[in-house]
Image: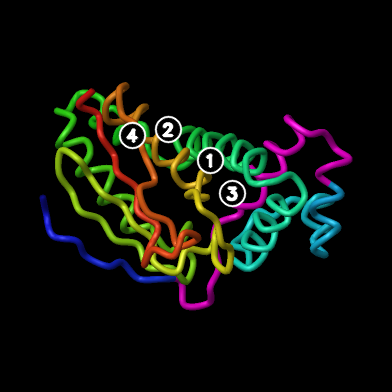
Amino acid sequence: MTPSLPHPAHPLGKIGPNGVTRLIEALRAVEGDNMVRRVFTGVGLAAHVETPPEEMVDERDAEALHAALRATLGDKRARTIGWIAGQRTADYLIHARIPRAVQGLMKIAPALLASRLLTTAMASHAWTFAGSGRFRTVHGRRTVLSIENCPMCRGHQSSEPLCDFYASAFERLYARLVHPAARVTETECQARGDAACRFTVDWRG
């Protein structure tokens, strides 16, 4: 495996708007508008529902929303919402952010090369999804992605990994661009007391 390298955090602790907008979509699809307003109003972020953000947002908004989801729905249902939001985020990135030419190259390249291309792209844009967290990658046939000081589970305690938003987004990207059998498992999570949230990517079956 290629040695892990840290990638710069966002200096102002901000993340892309998908951390909020896709959460609205997922929560509305599963639980309805009333629950969307209940969760967002409960943490003082009703304005995001009225006018979904289009620019970078304070990572503390996403942190508060995921904590509110768990408090309101319980960990299991909240994780389902997070998973759907992650899928929607990946779909948006594939549709609007990753150039078609790059996607075409990944799809015809051997999986290991396509994985390296995707991992490199993710690392160069890590500040947009990890905020003030530190993103690291270890590239190989079982690629490992990790986020230290993860904004999605910061300050939360659980016996189970909680970062389904990230796991789902990573899995969707790898399955669509690297190998259809790609699966992502969160093997460590700060909510369990681990040093970082770590995600293992494997497409070998």
Residue range in magenta is 10-36
Element under label 1? helix
Q: Farthest right residue?
A: 34
**How dense is the environment of label 3, judged by Cα within 10 Å: few (below 14), some, or many (20 and up)?**
many
Q: Give the numbered dot on residue 18.
A: 3
Q: Are marks 2 and 4 in contact (CB under 8 Å)?
A: yes
For the view shown, which residue lies furthest in the front direction? 159
Asked if residue 3 lies left or right of residue 125, the reply is left
Residues at discs 2 and 1 in contact (Cβ within 8 Å): yes
> Which of labels 4 and 3 is toward the front?
4
Label 1 to label 4: alpha-carbon separation: 13 Å
Q: Measure how far apart labels 2 and 1 are at the Cα level.
A: 8 Å
* Left or right relative to 77: residue 195: left
Q: Residue at x 63, y 68 (%)?
A: 60
Residue ranking furthest to the left: 1
Pointer 4 residue? 174
Residue in the picture at 59% in, 49% down: 18
Disc nearer the start of the sequence (4/3): 3
Residue 24 sits in quarter: top right
Label drawn at residue 172: 2
* Tag 4 and tag 3, C-beta contact below 8 Å: no
Q: Residue 83 in the image: x percent, y percent?
A: 55, 38
* Disc 3, SS: helix
Q: Earlier in the sequence, mark 3 or mark 1?
A: 3
Magenta stretch: helix, strand or loop mostly: helix
What is the crowding at mark 2: few (fewer than 14 residues within 10 Å), some, or many (at least 20)? many
Instruction: Name the residue carrying label 1.
Output: 86
| Left or right of 16, for residue 181 | left
